[in-house]
Image (spheres, grey):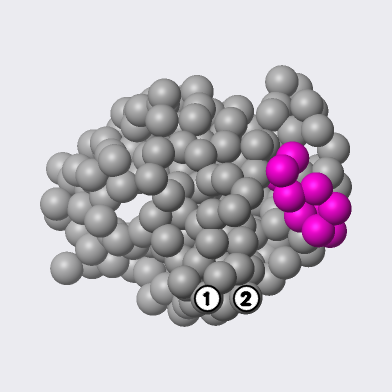
Amino acid sequence: MKKIVVLTGAGISAESGIKTFRDSGGLWEEHRVEDVATYDAWLRNQELVLEFYNQRRKQLYECSPNAAHFALAKLGKKYDVQIITQNVDDLHERGGSTKILHLHGELKKARSTVDENLVYEIKGWELKKGDRCEKGSQLRPHIVWFGEAVLNIVLAAQLSSEADIYIVIGTSLNVYPAAGLLNYVPNHVPKYLIDPNGAEVAGIRNLTVIKEKAGKGVPELVKVLTL
C-alpha cells in the first residue's frame, strides 16, 4: 500500500470556523502574542493564559470537521495516510483519520509543568488554576508556545522522507521548522500544494499547486487519487 503523507496548516481548520492568527480577524488580535503564547507570559499571568486557551477550547467544541477532513479520511481507505498537522484542534480525528502527528500540541490536552511526559485529556473546555498533575504541579496547556521546541519535528521529517505522495494543505509554508519538511521529501515523489495563495516553492521538484480552499481542493484531489 502506497504511503501518502499530508502536512496541514491553519487553512484547513479555518473553513470549520476556527480563526487563524494570520487572518485580519485573527484571534491573536485580541491579545499580543507575548501576553498569551510564550512561556514568559505563563510566568507573568497564568490566569490570562489559561482563560485565553479556555476560550479557544470552548470555540473548538462548537466547530465540526469540514469536507477536507472527511476527504482525507476517505483517502485512508486506499492508501496508508499519515497526517502531520500544525493545528492544535482535533478536527482530523473527528473527521475519521487515524494516524495524526501533532507538531504544535493539542488544545484538548494539558501537561505537567514539572514533567512534560505527563499529558492529560481535559474534561470539558476549562483548565483552571489549581488543576494539578500527579506530582502536584500546575497543569498548563499542551501547546507549543513561541520560542519552545516543536514537538515531534524529527519524527515528522522521517515520515516525510518515506512518502510515496506528499500533500500540503492550507499552510503558507512560512512557519518553520514545519515549512522545511518539504525538503525531506525525495525529488521524484509527486507533491501537491492546496492553498488559495499557493505558489511554486524554490528547490522543490514535482510540485503541483492547486489554488483552492481546502474544502474544495482536497475532495477534488482525493477523487483523482482514488479513481
Question: Residue 160: x, y in percent?
Answer: 46, 70
The local crowd at label 1, few if under 14, some if 14 to 19, many if 20 or more residues have their Cα within 10 Å, is few
- In the structure shown, which secondary structural element does the residue marked by tag 1 occupy? loop
Residue 48 within the segment the image draws in magenta = yes
Q: Is residue 150 left or right of residue 57?
A: right
Q: Which residues are magenta?
A: 40-49
Relative to 99, does residue 36 appear above or below in the rendering? above
Q: Which mark is residue 135?
A: 1
Residue 149 lies in what quarter of the image? bottom right
Foreground: 208 or 88? 88
| Residue 48 in sight | yes
* Quadrant into which the C terminus falls: top left
Foreground: 219 or 111? 111
Residue 162 lies in what quarter of the image? bottom left
The local crowd at label 2, few if under 14, some if 14 to 19, many if 20 or more residues have their Cα within 10 Å, is few
Relative to 79, does residue 25 appear above or below in the rendering? above
Name which residue lies at 80% across and 33% down: 31
Q: Is residue 214 left or right of residue 220?
A: right
